[in-house]
Image (cartoon, rainbow, N blue to C red):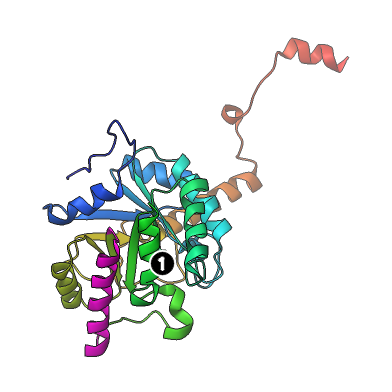
């Protein structure tokens, strides 16, 4: 597996430029979401160079039905935790709903919070042409931007469901145009979510920055998945595009059932899990 450089004299962390430079590498770029310090540490230990603090945290961590209720404070809070739990990985932080579909100045203010307060190295924005001005300004201000097109979960109220995008000619052409615009505005990579594999392949060939797919087939330059989907921790919905490497939810439930039973039965804690004291002193104390 290729590991990105990072750890140089100037930066401890992998940079957006390191990620952009993976475009023509043989190995694909694996990305996983992380929302807290422990997950970030595990992912980094496993060799993951890029961690996305996705606004999917609204669903898999905070219990919302969509990503729409997630606010800037949530993103800053979880970004800080992921930064604390990792040393070398590049941390991309999602700009939540309505934090960038506002004025360019407000977009800049919100993005800077993720970088300055949160400690992220780049931000991710959902959308193409309509937010090109915001992307351009962020990049010009020194904030690296990861684009995100195809299914953009923050537009769920317009789209009406988590549906595959770009299946009809006009939509496919629009997505290709969006990708090119994001590249032109200076984005260093683009997430392609839930689009047909041949379209993802075409976009990947047509842009000079890495594409990172999720439900976009095998031809993207990298892949991103939600941690909870990979580990079987989000039973409400298992997307077709995910592969469960563990069924952790079931294992955790089973372990907790055993704990509950052992507490009820008085099997836990045992002597081994308890602390003793000098019996002489204890007798003395009772007097
Ligand atoms: O929020 C998220 O986890 C994402 C990924 C699905 C790309 O945006």
Q: Please name the residue shown 27% across and 82% down the image.
A: 174
Task: Please give the residue where the numbered disc 1 appears in the rendered image.
Answer: 134
Left or right? Give the position of 13 relative to 100. left
Query: Where does the image place residue 224, in percent across and percent down from the top left?
Result: 30, 60
Give the position of the C terminus as an image quadrant.
top right
- Name the residue: 53% across, 49% down: 258
Based on the displayed image, in which of its 4 quarters is residue 148 positioned? bottom left
Residue 215 visible in the picture: no
Q: Quadrant of the N terminus?
A: top left
Q: Is residue 171 visible?
A: yes
Residue 14: give x, y in percent of width and height.
30, 43
Q: Establish if 198 lies above or below 204.
A: below
In the foreground, 4 or 240 = 4
Residue that appears at 19% across and 77% down = 199
Magenta residues: mostly which secondary structure? helix
The residue segment tinted magenta is: 167-188
């Amino acid at each position: 597996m290729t590991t990105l450089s990072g750890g140089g004299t100037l930066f401890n962390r992998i940079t957006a430029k390191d990620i952009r430079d993976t475009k023509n590498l043989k190995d694909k770029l694996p990305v996983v979401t992380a929302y807290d310090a422990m997950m970030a540490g595990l992912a980094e230990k496993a060799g993951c160079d890029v961690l996305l603090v996705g606004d999917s945290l609204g669903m898999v961590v905070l219990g919302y039905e969509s990503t729409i209720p997630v606010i800037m404070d949530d993103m800053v809070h979880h970004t800080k935790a992921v930064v604390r739990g990792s040393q070398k990985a590049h941390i991309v932080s999602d700009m939540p709903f309505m934090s960038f579909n506002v004025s360019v100045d407000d977009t800049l203010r919100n993005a800077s919070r993720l970088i300055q307060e949160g400690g992220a190295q780049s931000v991710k924005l959902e959308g193409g042409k309509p937010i090109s001005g915001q992307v351009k300004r962020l990049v010009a201000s020194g904030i690296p931007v990861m684009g995100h097109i195809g299914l953009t979960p923050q537009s769920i109220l317009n789209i009406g469901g988590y549906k595959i995008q770009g299946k009809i000619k006009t939509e496919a052409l629009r997505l290709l145009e969006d990708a090119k615009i994001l590249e032109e505005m200076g984005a260093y990579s683009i997430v392609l979510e839930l689009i047909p594999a041949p379209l993802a392949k075409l976009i990947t060939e047509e842009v000079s920055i890495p594409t990172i797919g999720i439900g976009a087939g095998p031809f993207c330059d990298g892949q991103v998945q939600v941690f909870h989907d990979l580990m079987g921790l989000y039973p409400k919905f298992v997307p077709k595009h995910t592969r469960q490497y563990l069924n952790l939810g079931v294992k955790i439930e089973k372990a907790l059932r055993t704990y509950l039973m052992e507490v009820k039965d008085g099997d836990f804690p045992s002597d081994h899990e308890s602390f003793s004291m000098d019996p002489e002193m204890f007798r003395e104390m009772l007097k």
